[in-house]
Image (cartoon, grey):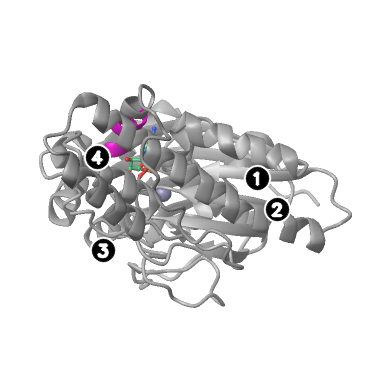
Amino acid sequence: MTHPDATVLGIETSCDETAASVVVRRGDGTGEILSNIVFSQLDLHAAYGGVVPEIAARSHVSVLDSLVEKALADADKTLDDMDAIAATSGPGLIGGLMVGLMTAKALSMVSGKPLHAVNHLEGHALTARLTDNLVFPYLLLLVSGGHTQIVLVKGVDDYERWGTTIDDALGEAFDKTAKLLGLPYPGGPAVEKAAATGDEKRFRLPVPLKGTPEPDFSFSGLKTAVRQTAEPQAPLSDQTVSDICASFQRAVCLSLADRLDIAFSRFAARFPDIADRALVIAGGVAANKALRGTLAEGADQHGFRLVAPPMELCTDNAAMIAWAAAERMAAGIGGDPLDTAPRSRWPLDSRSETVMGSGKRGAKV
Ligand code: KG4
Ligand code: ZN
């Protein structure tokens, strides 16, 4: 079925990136990003070793208007050309969400275009349809600073969360490990770099939840194990830091591989007739090369292909929010009322239970 083309302005402010983008979704289901502006607040938070919610919200306020103007100008469009205005409405840090959603409401009011209050996770979940024209259903592994989930993406607005973290998000575990070892924030790239020259077998760290039947995640025990490993080694030499990082990264990879084995088998049993099976990865941690290697190997063994959208679309951005709104419009889902409230917690799968650490993007300090 074809739908009219939809051009959407998207806004993302759920954590420490302020972003605005214009995306068009054509009637045949293909899409094009006309502009995609991201302002990272990394420098503002680095001194604190994590995202400070109040600083994040204030920074969104000061840059969002100009980002929206630039996104429209780069796309060579005006507000009048938009078919809808979309903003992340949750999950995330509430101050930031309020800034983005209120801005979208104001733009919707003045332009008369419908408002779409988008779930941030739906943005991540549907990105691969913009970049790779993926068809439903497929598996999504979302690994970021705020989320760690395995989701079955069945359709627009139709998700099953198969696994989530019961404590820390994976990016958070990288960041905390880095902090413990005296490495800079954000910890992920620093840990990966140190691990490259480390001996992953020097320290034997536990592989979280290995062998448990549900594909959930847990990283706080691993973080404690890193601390208990590091303390007796103090003062830490560069080589010891590298060896701990490599051992940590190995435990993470083994855990993810073990958790995904369950999801791959479950998908194959549920959809035996689907030949083109795909695992999509998203989130900042998906930049990790060791992790990508492990995932590619596991996917290959189970007859899945690994779909990794370009990194700038794996991490937080507004193109995914505009695209999700356009997908919702094409699926016949209408806009949201102007009194829609932002939600710091908002699970993608409304049937899933609330689990500590899931569906939230909390402060990492
Ligand atoms: O998706 P993202 O950019 O945004 C938020 O969740 O805010 O993810 C950021 C997270 C941080 O925790 C960072 O340490 C982690 O992704 N990260 C990595 C790597 N690059 C970023 N973790 C492991 N290896 C990396 N190369
Ligand atoms: Zn995200």
**In the displayed structure, would residue 309 be above or below residue 157?**
above
Q: Which percent across, then down, holds residue 324?
A: 54, 51
Mark 4 belongs to which amino acid? Answer: Ala
Q: Which residue is disc 4 drawn over?
A: 178
- Label 3 or label 1, whichever lies nearer to me, is 1
- Label 3 or label 4, whichever lies nearer to me, is 4
First in sequence: mark 2 or mark 1?
A: 2
**In the displayed structure, would residue 287 be above or below residue 49?**
above
Q: Secondary structure at mark 1?
A: strand
Quarter of the rendering occupied by the C terminus: bottom left
Q: Secondary structure at mark 2?
A: helix
Task: Specify the segment rendered in magenta.
Answer: 187-192
Mark 2 belongs to which amino acid? Answer: Phe
Distance from the alpha carbon under mark 3 to that under mark 2: 34 Å
- Contact between labelled residues 1 and 2, with CB atoms less than 8 Å apart: yes
Q: Which percent across, then down, holds residue 81?
A: 49, 41
Distance from the alpha carbon under mark 4 to that under mark 2: 31 Å
Decide whether residue 191 is among the magenta residues. yes
Mark 3 belongs to which amino acid? Answer: Ile
The picture quadrant where one finds residue 187 is: top left
Mark 1 belongs to which amino acid? Answer: Leu
